[in-house]
């Protein structure tokens, strides 16, 4: 095999697929990147696959001889990254498919490769469900919910985001057991062009691991100008395909919790905050709250100001008043300040509504102009008086 390509193209491709290379491989070949070259199309393709997440990307170059080889990911990445930008790089593999010679105008590197025969094939969905997803809608759904998924591997199903693709809208949800984020993305334009948004009649529900979604998010962000990205699903495997990239990931198996029943139907109290002012106050109070318990208290007393405070025993305390719109009896409620900040920061609306019943029952935050129907439920923290 012999190829010549641009250093920048090769480097970008390596950085992308190396995200799917196993950090602790169960087999030596899984620490490698698969490089294939096709003389007929002058396409160079790179693949990383850790048996859960697979990423493949291709770009144009000059292919003098077709072939395939796997090369240690870490070494290849460090070498190509340090070569002069935008310069030609040639890569030659000798006949016994073990030595890889990388040459640039500054010098050459010799690496030991492993023949590609033992490299696992990326799962290919031959049957099952296929649909077109609209990149901007998918990104919105992802950004509104991914932050609330769990980091606890013992709650495997909660370490992902649950997506339901419906005919005219997309629903996403994530929870870590202490909070829940739910987004419904669909507007007049989607509904008018629903054939582009979703091409199948029955709903598709999948739970995709957050770790895979971080990489899928990058792919979809790059392709957000495209009309749609193809999604295929079959037997616990999801494949996203755009013009020159493929990402495949296993889904999390099991029935996702019925989260809709966790959201109260009615609320006795509604408090309106200016979203930006609320976030800024919480960030200042968090300096003290983070010293100990991360708890922030919100006190309402039927005035146009709410008191936001934190008390870190033997260290200090913080208190700030912020404007609110609330008419009701005096009321105190406490939350984990990080949970509040993470949820509020994805809300684009000028005002946010806090809806609750008691200081011990679930509270929800919703944008005042709830056009994209975002609901963020947080369990309050019980504080001893």
Image: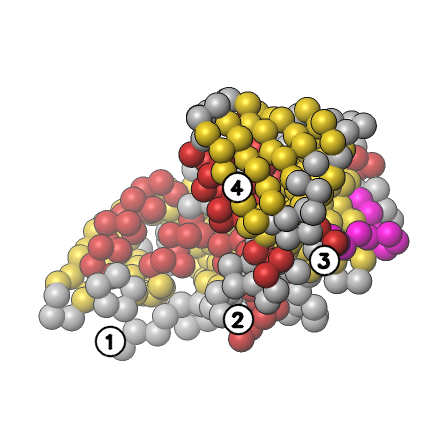
**Which mark is first along the chain, 1 or 2?**
2
Q: Nearer the viewer, residue 108 or 385?
A: 108
> Which label is found at residue 153?
2
Q: Which residue does the image show at 81% across and 28% down from the upper left?
A: 40
- The quadrant in which residue 285 appears is bottom left
Cβ–Cβ below 8 Å for labels 2 and 1? no
Residue for badge 4 = 110
**Which mark is first along the chain, 2 or 4?**
4
Of badges 3 and 4, nearer the viewer stands 4
Q: Is the residue 68 above or below the residue 172 in the image? A: above
Q: Which residue does the image show at 68% across and 24% down from the upper left?
A: 62
**Which mark is first along the chain, 1 or 4?**
4
Q: Is the residue 72 above or below the residue 134 in the image? A: below
Residue 323: x %, y % from top left: 30, 45
**Which mark is first along the chain, 4 or 3?**
4
Q: With 249 as the anchor, is 128 left or right in this view?
A: right
Residue for badge 3 = 118
Q: Is the residue 305 above or below the residue 6 in the image? A: below
Of badges 3 and 2, nearer the viewer stands 3
Cβ–Cβ below 8 Å for labels 4 and 1? no
Q: Residues within 10 Å of mark 2 (few under 14, many from 20)?
A: few
Tell me which segment is drawn in magenta. Answer: 121-131
Label 1 secondary element = loop
Q: Disc 1 versus disc 3: distance between alpha carbons? A: 64 Å
Q: Nearer the viewer, residue 48 or 134?
A: 48
Q: Disc 4 versus disc 1: distance between alpha carbons? A: 69 Å
Residue for badge 1 = 385
Q: Disc 4 versus disc 2: distance between alpha carbons? A: 40 Å
Q: Residues within 10 Å of mark 1 (few under 14, many from 20)?
A: few
Cβ–Cβ below 8 Å for labels 3 and 2? no
């Amino acid at each position: 095999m012999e190829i010549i390509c641009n250093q920048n193209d090769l480097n970008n491709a390596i950085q992308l697929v190396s995200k799917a290379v196993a950090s602790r491989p169960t087999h030596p070949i899984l620490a490698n990147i698969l490089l294939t070259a096709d003389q007929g199309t002058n396409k160079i393709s790179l693949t990383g696959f850790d048996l859960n997440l697979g990423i493949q990307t291709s770009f144009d170059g000059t292919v003098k001889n077709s072939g395939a080889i796997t090369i240690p990911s870490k070494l290849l990445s460090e070498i190509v990254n340090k070569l002069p930008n935008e310069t030609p790089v040639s890569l030659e593999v000798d006949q016994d498919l073990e030595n890889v010679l990388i040459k640039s105008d500054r010098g050459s590197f010799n690496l030991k490769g492993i023949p590609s025969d033992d490299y696992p094939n990326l799962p290919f969905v031959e049957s099952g469900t296929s649909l077109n997803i609209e990149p901007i809608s998918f990104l919105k759904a992802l950004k509104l919910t991914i932050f609330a998924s769990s980091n606890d591997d013992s709650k495997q199903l909660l370490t992902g985001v649950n997506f339901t693709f419906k005919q005219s809208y997309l629903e996403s949800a994530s929870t870590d057991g202490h909070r829940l984020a739910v987004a419904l993305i669909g507007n007049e334009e989607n509904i008018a062009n629903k054939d582009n948004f979703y091409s199948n009649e029955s709903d598709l529900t999948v739970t995709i691991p957050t770790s895979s979604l971080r990489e899928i998010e990058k792919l979809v962000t790059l392709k957000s100008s495209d009309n749609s990205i193809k999604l295929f699903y079959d037997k616990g495997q999801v494949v996203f395909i755009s013009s020159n990239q493929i990402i495949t990931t296993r889904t999390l198996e099991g029935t996702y919790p019925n989260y809709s029943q966790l959201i109260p139907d009615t609320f006795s109290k509604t408090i309106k905050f200016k979203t930006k002012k609320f976030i800024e106050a919480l960030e200042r109070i968090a300096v003290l709250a983070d010293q100990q318990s991360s708890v922030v208290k919100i006190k309402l007393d039927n005035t146009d100001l709410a008191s936001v405070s934190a008390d870190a025993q033997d260290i200090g305390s913080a208190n700030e008043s912020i404007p609110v719109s609330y008419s009701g009896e005096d009321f105190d409620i406490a939350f984990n300040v990080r949970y509040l900040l993470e949820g509020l920061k994805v809300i684009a609306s000028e005002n946010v509504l806090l809806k609750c019943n008691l200081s011990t029952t679930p509270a929800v935050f919703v944008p005042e102009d709830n056009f994209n129907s975002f609901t963020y439920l947080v369990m309050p923290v019980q504080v001893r008086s």
